Amino acid sequence: MNAMLHQFHDMKANPSPSWLPLAFGVTLESTRVMRGATLADAAAALDIEPRYLSALEREAFEEMIYPIHAMRIARDYVAWLDLPERDLMAALPGAMERRSRTLRREAAPVEEAPQPIGFFAKIKAALH
């Protein structure tokens, strides 16, 4: 926990994109947890449903009503967490695109490979 706090202070002193983790949501969640806040605390302070904040932390952007909705909530959440808004908001479209690609890949139909037919199966098929 001390290392995470030290990294957070470094991040605040030098808010450059180099500190940004690959996962946008991890930054939000870890910062919230380091501050001892719950999703309910954040939701109450921002007047936003907790499920939307949870969706941001999980990068489940498809649970938002519209992409612009995700961007507005993210901007408010980033400001509430006192994180560098410019860098995090610049990372958001990339996170949304990665999630979209993942969902498309998961939704793509999987073609089954044809099963090899053994010698006896061929004879049986020919007799029927």
Image: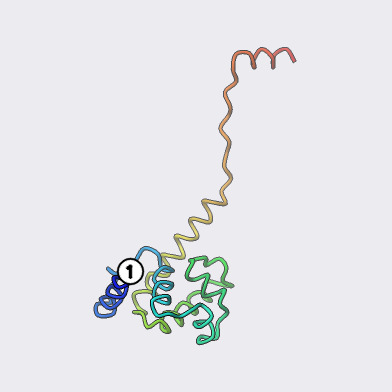
In the image, what residue occupies the spot 52% across and 72% down? 54
Residue 43 at x, y percent in the picture: 53, 82
Q: Amino acid at mark 1?
A: Leu
Q: Quadrant of the N terminus?
A: bottom left
Which image quadrant for residue 63? bottom right
| Secondary structure of the residue carrying numbered label 1 | loop
Q: Nearer the viewer, residue 59 or 54?
A: 54
Q: Position of residue 38 (x, y in %)?
A: 49, 78
Q: Residue at x 53, y 76 (%)?
A: 69
- Residue 126 locus on image (x, y percent): 69, 14
**Quarter containing the C terminus:** top right
Instruction: Please give left or right for residue 122 compared with residue 56 in the image.
Output: right
* Nearer-the-camera pick, 28 or 97: 28
Picture quadrant of residue 18: bottom left
Residue 67: give x, y in percent of width and height: 52, 71
Q: Nearer the viewer, residue 33 or 48?
A: 33
Residue 56 vs 111, above or below: the answer is below
Name the one closer to the observer, 90 or 39. 39
Residue carrying label 1:
20
